[in-house]
Image (cartoon, rainbow, N blue to C red):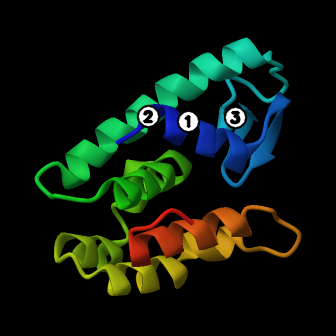
Amino acid sequence: MNTLRIIEQIKKDEGFSPKAYFDNDQYTNGFGTKAKYSTEEIDKQEAEIRLGVRVQEAINDFKVLFGGKEIDEVRAEALVNMLFNLGRTKLSHFKKLLGAIYREEWGTAAHEAFNSAWFKQLSKPGLKSIERAERIVWELLTGTKG
């Protein structure tokens, strides 16, 4: 797994916002990391530090969920991106998706991701994040970078 590539992809997916904004269920700033308070403003240097910490947490979550599985690099990075976006607790509720991954049924895993609440959330009209969701589903399905 290439941590620097994951960080660069998430930076592209999230974009940078110095000011906190409400995103789904929390205030977010920087490169998609949780803001400390609703009016917090940070610079890019602080955002990079928080992003690095949060990506490492997502990698650790990946190891907890899939540590015993042999998962190719592209799919592993796609799952880390999902874990960054959702967190381990929320992803743990995607039982059919996780079951398909454990069985290495990548077509089913991609189908479950595509039909999930996560995909629908990222696909709301006007959101650029549809590209992220579609890319991750593609990467789960094919094992190739999207």
On the rendered structure, is 127 left or right of 27?
right
Q: Tags 1 and 2 in contact by the CB under 8 Å rule?
A: yes
Dot placed on the residue nearer the N-terminal end, 3 or 1: 1
How many numbered tags mark residues here? 3
For image coordinates 18% across by 70% down, the residue present is 102
User: What is the quadrant of the N terminus in the image?
Assistant: top left
User: Which residue corresponds to the image point at 15% horizontal and 58% vertical from the top-left?
Assistant: 69
Q: Farthest residue to the front: give it.
A: 144
Q: Secondary structure at mark 1?
A: helix
Badge 3: residue crowd in 10 Å (few <14, some 14–19, many ≥20): many
Q: Quadrant of residue 39?
A: top right
Image check: 57 left or right of 33? left
Q: Residue at x 36, y 67 (%)?
A: 93
Measured in 3D between alpha carbons, the distance from the residue under mark 3 to the one under mark 1, in whole angstroms, is: 10 Å
Label disc, if present, on residue 7 of the rendered structure: 1
Residue bearing mark 3: 31
Q: Where is mark 2, residue-wise? A: 3
State left or right for residue 145 relative to residue 105.
Answer: right
Residue at 62%, 73% in the rendered image? 134
- For residue 140, which quarter of the picture? bottom left
Q: Position of residue 74 (x, y in %)?
A: 40, 58
Q: Is residue 46 left or right of 114 when viewed as pictured?
A: right
Q: Residues within 10 Å of mark 2 (few under 14, many from 20)?
A: some
SS state under label 3: loop
Q: Position of residue 66 (x, y in %)?
A: 21, 54
Q: Is residue 62 above or below residue 35?
A: below
Amino acid at dot 1: Ile
Relative depth, front residue between 71 and 23: 71
Q: As drawn, which residue projects farthest toward the left?
A: 68
